[in-house]
Image: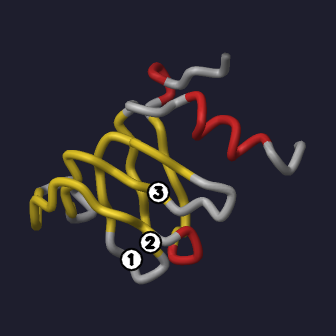
Amino acid sequence: MRIDLPLKLLEKNLESPILVKLKDGSEYIGKLERSDISMNLILSEAKQVSENREMIANYGKILIRGSNILYISIEPDKVRYE
């Protein structure tokens, strides 16, 4: 896999709903507004959710630091490759 592929995939999926799990175990869902080379993310309509997807808190717009991210998930049927 090319090293820049994850970054390009994020770039092509701006405005898509995503789930972000952090290293501390917390999870956030929201629309991807921006990402950068360090995989820092800006999410709009962001909500912190429990593991069974129940809302814990509604934040609106948030910045997630890339070094805190464990994984990012985009719904398979909504992924844009081009």
Residue 13 screen position, x and y as percent: 52, 30
What's the distance in space between the residues labelled 3 and 2, CA to CA?
A: 12 Å
Residue 11 screen position, x and y as percent: 59, 36
The reply to whether dot 2 and dot 1 touch (C-beta < 8 Å) is yes
Q: How dense is the environment of label 2, judged by Cα within 10 Å: few (below 14), some, or many (20 and up)?
A: some
Q: Nearer the viewer, mark 3 or mark 2?
A: 3
Among the 4 quarters of the image, the one containing residue 57:
bottom left
What's the distance in space between the residues labelled 2 and 1, CA to CA?
A: 5 Å
Q: Amino acid at mark 1?
A: Gly
Q: Earlier in the sequence, mark 1 or mark 3?
A: 1
**Residue on which the image places disc 3:** 41
Q: Amino acid at mark 2?
A: Leu
- 21 to 10, vertically: above or below: below
Q: Earlier in the sequence, mark 3 or mark 2?
A: 2
- 38 to 34, vertically: above or below: below
Q: Residue at x 40, y 42 (%)?
A: 32
Q: Quadrant of the N terminus?
A: top right
Residue 42 screen position, x and y as percent: 39, 54
Q: Residue at x 51, y 76 (%)?
A: 68
Front-lying residue, 34 or 25: 34
Q: Nearer the viewer, mark 2 or mark 1?
A: 2
What's the distance in space between the residues labelled 1 and 3, CA to CA?
A: 17 Å
Is 29 on the left or on the right of 53, as rendered?
Answer: right
Label 2: element kind: strand
Per the rendering, the mark at residue 25 is 1
Q: Residue at x 38, y 31 (%)?
A: 15
Q: Residue at x 65, y 64 (%)?
A: 38
Among the 4 quarters of the image, the one containing residue 50:
bottom left
Residue 74 screen position, x and y as percent: 47, 38
